[in-house]
Image (cartoon, helix red, strand yellow):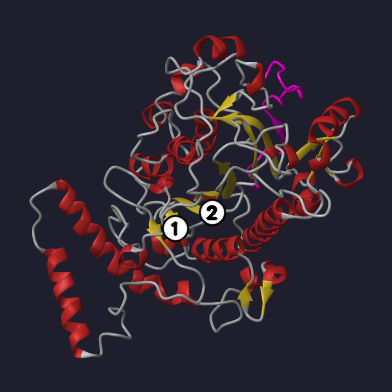
Amino acid sequence: MHHHNHSPSRRRLLAGALGLGGLAALAPLRSARAADFKALVCVFLYGGNDGMNTVVPLDATRYAAYAKVRAGLALPQGSLGRLGSSDFGLHPSMAALNPLFAAGRMAVQFNVGPLYAPLTQAQYRADAGKTVLTPPSLFSHSDQQVLWESASTDAQSRTGWGGRASALLGLPSPVISVGGNGHFGLSDLAAPLVVPGPGDGFGAAGLAAADVSWKPNALKLDAVKALADQSADTDLAGAFQQQQRDAFALSEQLGPLVKRKPGEAGSNAAVDAAFAPLIVNGNVSTRLGRQLYQTAKLLDVRATLGGSRQIYFAQLGGFDTHGNQVGTDALSGTHAALLKELSDALACFQAALTGLGLAESVTTFTQSDFGRTFKPNNSSGTDHAWGNHHLVLGGAVKGGFYGSYPTLAVGGPDDAAVNAWEEQGRWIPTSSVDQYAATLLGWMGASAGQLDTLLPNLANFGSARTLGFV
């Protein structure tokens, strides 16, 4: 069953600033030493990215197996950008990332996805959804987005792993989202701080400093602040009021920075220079580029948000490529354009971090609903699958390949199929979202005990708690 809600709700309560949980105290403007600072940046690819055409094997045997099954979707072997001296290449639209791999700043994590515990094909066939061993609602967009964003196998999970980590690790700010109100940033008592794109106002509509010179708006602002200041009779109401107070304070501090576009007075020259390939007529020209431009600006003033740890969320939609995944050939079309937007934005962002002296301090990683079928469908596209390949970038990353690349056979040992008609090459993950999240949060400084609290299924993986890429 397909659920076609491919991007998160964009509710912008109080113009997005309401979800500011537990910002205990706004730190004064000061420079946090980069050596003490660490941030995670999640880039969620909504709709389910086709990992099989993102990273492709180049050795003769596996490439032949790939080309035979992929047929009209197969990328020409000579078009692939070889990753270092390895037997794998990136989609030709992703050329901007090859230098990062060559510099040891990018890891490829193979075949990762939601798992309750390690799962063999024999166990999957015997279980087939009867127990917790099979995650619920496989192949459904909305459910699998929740499993990835919550790092759980509970499709009813209310919180995201970014939000839980912010709360448990005592981060002064919640998850800072430049990509809408995604599930990833939710904690028990806070939603993410949602920041708009460059050029947009940040704050309560009609109640910003420029608006309250008009008496009715000033009275309205006084009333809203009075409501936020009165005593609350429940924890939830108190948390909501605290978010309102923090949101007003932070939007006043950050509003001018958030609104600033490339080249405007006070813009950061290093960030503008890094994003120059994407700047057209004074604007960052792509959706993800605008989000990561904002992220770089916010990381530059990291002390304003307080604390030495921060978590960010960005997203790019459109990856549900059931039809016309490729254009006139496999090098053009929907998927190629999406991967170019992703790669160019990530490369500019990494250049900005280098310019800000934060390359070692920020780790960026991808997530997505699921992978896509190895076997194409009848519409020049691919369908919903399970395990997928993901990218992790940054100066702290140990570049290379991690996890197990699946056996490229429809109905082979990695295929999640019980009956012959189900054999499409939907890989049973060999690494779990819990291990992926634990690797990233462990780098942030989470203790073993904190990781067990944050990631309830992690204990099911025994001593294989992390994947080793940072």
**Which quarter shows the C terminus?**
top right
Report the span colored magenta: 393-414
Magenta stretch encompasses residue 232: no
Q: Which of 309 and 56 is in front in this view?
A: 56
Corner quadrant of residue 281? bottom right
Q: Residue 54 carries which label?
A: none
Q: Which amino acid type is shown beneath numbered disc 1?
A: Gly
Q: In this view, does 142 lie to the left or right of 237?
A: right
Report the amino acid beneath label 2: Gln
Q: Where is residue 188 in the image (x, y as percent from the top left)?
A: 28, 42
On screen, residue 357 versus residue 150, left or right, reads right
Classify 219 as above or below 298.
below
Residue placed under numbered mark 1 in the picture: 180
The CA distance from mark 2 to mark 1 is 8 Å
How many circles with numbers are drawn on the protein? 2
Q: Main secondary structure of the magenta part?
A: loop
Which secondary structure, mark 2? strand
Q: Name the residue under label 2.
A: 315
Q: Which residue is found at the position 59% from the left and 53% from the top?
A: 318
